Amino acid sequence: MLMVDMAHIAGLVAGGAHPSPVPHADFVTSTTHKTLRGPRSGLVLCKAKYAQALDKTVFPGLQGGPLEHTAAAKAVCFREAMQPDFRVYAAQIVANARALAADLAGRGFRLVSGGTDTHLMLVNVGASGLTGKEASAALDNAGIICNKNAIPFDTKSPFVTSGIRIGHPAATTRGMREPEMRQIAAWIAEILGNAADTELQARVRKEVTAFARGYRVP
């Protein structure tokens, strides 16, 4: 049997910006947040021959009382994913990711895999003399939220790491495009080039706050 978890890329699949695993897999699992842009929840798809067994496993096997508000929110999420605008959103996510990745690479940062085909990129900050923990903390102080992340063959512990992971579906939802990605890359480079400079972090945080006010959540 083949099972695929497409939690991160479900929105890109729905929007036609990434190949779908559904025709090929026996089971497909996903969250409904992340790129799918719905509530914090999940779903399981399967071949018809497994449907009855899966339903029984979920209820009464595993699941208790349903959360009706979350079920309603998922219905809204799926309806939005069926609209033409969602395909525009998915395509823009990929375009934004490539712009941000290219700008960071152009500023000397080493990206695991050399770039990205999705909404995520993994930056090897160890090559710049930082740990992922130091880099994410400095960016957090500047109002740019990412998380520390291990890289392939990482010699640092999972609590320290040598990388940071960057994603931006929320920024795309708020209307940011390639020029805004380049501005974000400039801030990231400035902060990581002076990761111990708390005055710089405070200044950039004010700039980021003013910048974000121009892109309200829809």
Image (spheres, rainbow, N blue to C red):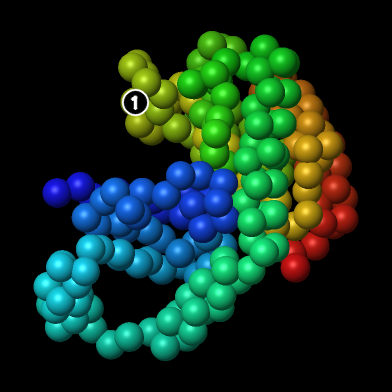
Q: Residue at x 37, y 58 (%)?
A: 30
User: Where is residue 151 drawn, in percent x and y?
Assistant: 41, 24
Tell me the residue at 67%/64% (across/down).
84
Q: Quadrant of residue 83?
A: bottom right
- Pointer 1 residue: 157
In the image, 109 versus 50, the foreground residue is 50
Using residue 79 as the reference point, say whether residue 30 is left or right of it.
left
Residue 54 visible from this viewpoint: no
Residue toward you, 1 or 31: 1
Identify which residue, 73 or 90, lies in the foreground: 90
Q: Where is residue 195 in the image (x, y as percent from the top left)?
A: 67, 23
Q: Which of 91 and 208 is in front in this view?
A: 91
For the point 72% across and 16% down, the residue is 107
Q: Which residue is drawn at 42% across and 49% down?
A: 20
Q: Judge left or right: residue 24 versus residue 133.
A: left
Q: In which quarter of the image is residue 182?
A: top right
- Indicate the amino acid at tag 1: Ser
Q: Is 81 left, or right, of 19 in this rendering?
A: right
Q: In which quarter of the image is residue 217?
A: bottom right
Above or below, comparing residue 65 to residue 117 in the picture: below
x, y percent for residue 98 = 66, 31
* Quarter of the image with the C terminus in it: bottom right
Q: How many marks?
A: 1
Q: Indicate whether 42 appears above or below 27.
A: below
Residue 7 x/y as whole percent? 41, 53
Q: In the rendered image of this protein, does residue 199 appear above or below residue 141?
A: above
Query: Please, what secondary structure does the residue beneath circle 1 have?
Result: loop
Task: Please tell me how crowded label 1 is: few (under 14), some (14-19), or many (20+) other residues with Cα within 10 Å.
Answer: few
Residue 129 in sight in this render: yes
* Above/below status of 31 relative to 149: below
**Horizontal side of residue 142 vs 4, given as left or right:** right
